[in-house]
Image (cartoon, coloured by chain):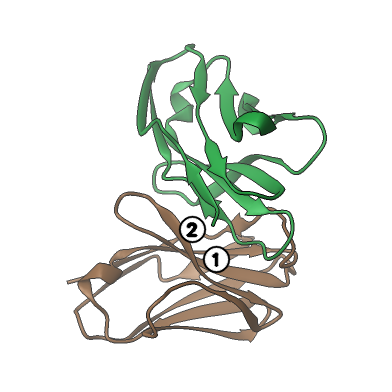
Chain colours: A green, B brown
Amino acid sequence: AQSVSQHNHHVILSEAASLELGCNYSYGGTVNLFWYVQYPGQHLQLLLKYFSGDPLVKGIKGFEAEFIKSKFSFNLRKPSVQWSDTAEYFCAVTSQTGANNLFFGTGTRLTVIP
Amino acid sequence: DTAVSQTPKYLVTQMGNDKSIKCEQNLGHDTMYWYKQDSKKFLKIMFSYNNKELIINETVPNRFSPKSPDKAHLNLHINSLELGDSAVYFCASSPSFLPYEQYFGPGTRLTVT
């Protein structure tokens, strides 16, 4: 069965600090990987996705993530966070074969202090 | 126009009642989903429908029954509500059941008292 681990439960940063949120997945086959963001009181929005090709993917709002197959990881990064990045971040995975069943990690809450 | 919409946004009800949550998407997608987000923010898929047909049914109690009158709508009916059903329920859609990004609705916060 697929599973996704996000080890950072709550991250607190000052504005302009760099961000890296960890995501590790467990699955024996080929996967698609996603990062979603949930701003306070809002629905989930896609930040970025990896299906194939360049393992370094760029998303919206200056976010990027790197797929490292050997480590089963897909960490999210941003060089300089802003107060408006305060949100819950979810890593998710689907199998490249079979149904489009998103498995989510438990989420990481990011608080950015002005 | 909202791509994926849900009604109601908030739902407060008593144990034992029956309630429904509606979801509509105007993206022309073939596949729709229901997810449950618990109090710890953990998201788990419940159901997925492709062209009105059920393709995923995770281990969800029989009290939950999805209904898809057409491919733009996927409603969730819950019978005999229990305290543990309190959660935020998200509807989502994607172009097909093949792996693709999903677009989420705003969520329905269900509180069972």
Residue assigned mark 1: B5
Q: Mark 1 to mark 2: distance in Å?
A: 7 Å
- A113 and B48: which is toward the camera: B48
In which chain is the residue bearing label 2? B
- When the figure is inspected, residue A73 is found, relative to residue B21, above or below; the finding is above
In the structure shown, which secondary structural element does the residue marked by tag 1 occupy?
strand
Name the image quarter holding residue A76.
top right
Identify the residue at image location x=45%, y=41%. Answer: A39
Q: In the image, residue A77 lies at what x, y percent? A: 57, 23
Give the residue type that dot 2 points to: Pro
Identify the residue at image location x=60%, y=48%. Answer: A27
Q: Is residue B101 left or right of residue A80?
A: right
Name the image quarter holding residue A69.
top right
Identify the residue at image location x=73%, y=72%. Answer: B30
In the structure shown, which secondary structural element does the residue marked by tag 2 occupy?
loop
Outermost residue to the right: A53
In the rendered image, which quarter contains the C terminus of chain A?
Answer: top left
Is the C-beta separation of discs 1 and 2 under 8 Å? yes
Residue assigned mark 2: B106
